[in-house]
Image (spheres, coloured by chain):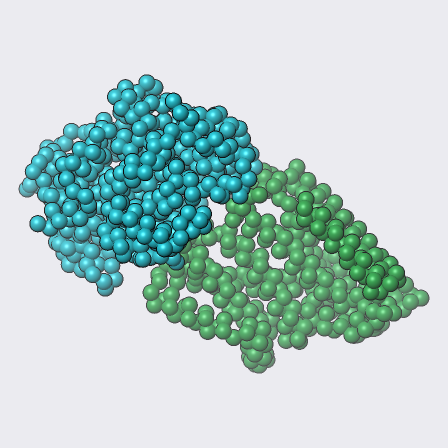
Chain colours: A cyan, B green
Amino acid sequence: MSEPLVKIRGLKIEGRADEEWIQIVNGIDLDLHRGKVLGLIGESGAGKSTVGLAAMGFTRDGCRISAGTIEFDGIDLRSVSRAQRRALLGKRIAYVAQSAAASFNPAHKIIDQHTEAPTYHNVMSKKDSEADAIDLYNRLRLPNPDEIGFRYPHQVSGGQLQRAMTAMAMSCRPDLIIFDEPTTALDVTTQIEVLASIRDIVEQFNTAAIYITHDLAVVAQMADEIKVLLKGDEVEQADTRTMLSNPREDYTKSLWAVRSFTRPQKPVADRNSTPVVSVANITAAYGKSVDVLHGVSFDIHAGRTVAVVGESGSGKSTVARVITGLLPPREGHIEFDGKPLAPSYKQRTKDELRQAQMIYQMADTALNPRVRIKDIIGRPVEFYGGLKGEARDKRVAELLNQIELEPSMYMDRLPGELSGGQKQRVGIARALAAEPKFIICDEVTSALDQLVAEGILRLLAQLQDDLDLAYMFITHDLATVRAIADEVVVMKEGRVVESGPKDEMFKPPHHPYTDLLLSSVPEMDPDWLTRLLDERGVDNLGDAASARIDT
Amino acid sequence: MKGWIYFALFLVAAAFAIFLIGGQGALAAVLKYAKWIGIIVIVCAIVSWLFRELLRRVMPEVIAKPMRQAPLTAAFGLLIILIYVAVSLGAPLFAPYGEAEIFKNINVLPGGNPELGGNPDHLLGTDQIGRDILSRLIYGARNTVGIAFLTTLLSFFIGITLGFLAATLGGWIDQVFSRAVDALMAIPQLIFALLLMTIASEWSYRSGISLTWFMIIIIAVLDSTRVFRLSRAVGLNIVVMDYIEAAKIRGETLSYLVFKEILPNAFSPLLAEFGLRFCFVFLTIASLSFLGIGIQPPLADWGTMVRDLSQFINFAAYDPLTAALPLMAAGAIALLTVAVNFVVDWMLHNTSGLKE
């Protein structure tokens, strides 16, 4: 076998925290051959991005490589001078970041940023590089390849920008590209386009790649080999098929098992009973601009979970804002327990406000960082229930027990001293503290690792059974919908395109848009993407999909 | 480390330049003062180190913990501020005479040596109308610092309340407040204060209310424009957070939102700003007093003292001690400003999360 392109031995990386160096990567070995794709997966904090960056001889600020060797094509990246490394970066090693929108300079046209590296490294003249860029845009199936490069980054969509960034990484035909979660911020339908184009172009140019992600189904499509990391240690490495069919380590098995949590659908609620929340013909707009919701209607019954799904921009979070009264609708009305609800939260009674609570996506911004946990949860207890002093603390302890956090340990902490999953649990407790009938869960699991997210879903399901809560579950993740929903509402461009009980929704025939959403969810099968592309049988998936929906 | 080497090189170069221009005599004179400056710096460093050790060991954990990471400059700043506070609170105890007490010996020279025109009863001498300068310096701490503190508090109360209201409510309320603040800020502050004080002196004369109260309100309002700007900007970043939204749809009142949800998160930048603004207010008051329309006699005040004693500076060539008299009040102002800034720098460093 030939010498690997990237050879890392005993890599140790330390990060600085509170004036101390703490080891965050504990001796990783890594081999990558030309033309191969290695998938790095793990939870957040596993060190996968850190290892990926180290393969370029680079560490983030506040980190340092403390031991080990990093060889790229026989060059020791740890001992080369900055100038020598600069000659490699961009030319022979390229990097694609998670957020293309944050990585492009908004002040320059896309193609001008594309041609920067080839002209800097004297690979091509600016003119040749522009022609090459258009060729790459073509290969990556970007719409209007001749023209799209001459736009500014904010003038193209997120998925297109991510592909433009991949094209940019390709501009010098590097030997190695590091993809750091390139599709995590994208919708499932867009994700497919980016995945397909990344895979094609990597194959066409025989480029080696390190693909970092936390999504197993995605990595199954992209990688030849998979390496699983946990807290800076390697768990195991194997080729993709072996890893999927026959994982050796328990940790890997637990990762694979996450997607197995599902709850049977509850019987459809009696049509004649009064729904807890009834939304009828809601049309709403931000300011005086165009409407973002067009005649949205659905009902939510007691003890049931209604999942509202759709891509970003489909108006699903706007529905939540209308129900909570933050955005009074232009037309239509909302009923709660059969009684009409005032359009603005300012006109609602305290009891109406208490009945409907909300849990947010980002627990970091949903909990006041300067308020202790007992006061965060205690405030609604005091505000709605009128409990004070010891009675209040007792109720807070009860709630903490309900969300499976030990009261004596967590009462006096600040949100910053909790993990992401624990913060989300506190968010749930704050909603429960009001003793509501109805809770809106806005993407509550999408910022969490899969194992943690699963815990949250189980907790929510448990609470629903105990307290007969009605949930409106906003998500773009269909795996979550499968796990927890009783009914599904599919939204697109501010309209409800299809709705019904979960079991029916996951069975054909579907509305074409539902079909597109469902079929776009990556599966844990390495052949899934190939098969899907064959089935759809088209080059430009996005265009084809929208063409199918329009007809 | 590199910084210190450059600093040493700079000192050597400066000494050489002085030698070239002024000859050996000039160099010797400069070195004499440099020696004193060096001694003062070292003594200050030792005192602050001792003070910091004291805080670390004796104080409860709340105070001792941050002090473990505090630089010497911060300890020095804290010490000076504490001394000022003690002096201004206990002025009647420390001062040998009353602040408005007049003696028959006027213009007694400082030093307390009768052969040189001094008087042991008045260590720093007396002024043109026979008031003891040491007593007035001590009482001046109480007036100048106390009034500046009160003014800054008032200006922060106005600025923070209006700034957070503008940030939370937005819309036309924000527009009205912000444009009004723009209009106030468009006029140079000291000139505007002078103008208003001139008008206020007439009101004060008619109503019998002390001019000092008018001064406090005028400077507080003018200075609150800066506080408004800052708290509105900080507030805007906080009101978009989900926890504010959660509080809103819980049905919380506006005052709860402003004081319980927003204020704790804006506390650190505002506290740092408080230190800085305190210095500016302090200097504005001293400037107004120096110009004769600030704190009025018989209240002792450092700005007024600088003005009253300013002609003594002409004696610098003959009697450095006498010439230093106006500089004592000025030095008291400078020292407090430096001390407050040391503490503010440290707090800013802590809150911004910058680590080496």
Residue for point 67% across, 46% down: B2
- Residue B88 percent across, percent down from the top left: 67, 58
Is residue A454 in sight in this rendering? no
Residue for point 76% across, 54% down: B11
Residue for point 91% across, 67% down: B116
Q: Is A18 drawn above or below residue B260 in the view shown?
A: above
Residue for point 79% across, 65% down: B324
Nearer to the camera, B294 or A115:
A115
Q: In the shown orientation, is residue A113 left or right of residue B297?
A: left
Nearer to the camera, B304 or A95:
A95
* Callout count: 0
- Residue B163 percent across, percent down from the top left: 43, 62
- Residue A446 percent across, percent down from the top left: 29, 39
Is residue A540 in sight in this rendering? yes
Classify residue B182 by image quadrant: bottom left
Q: In the shown orientation, is residue B124 left or right of residue A540?
A: right
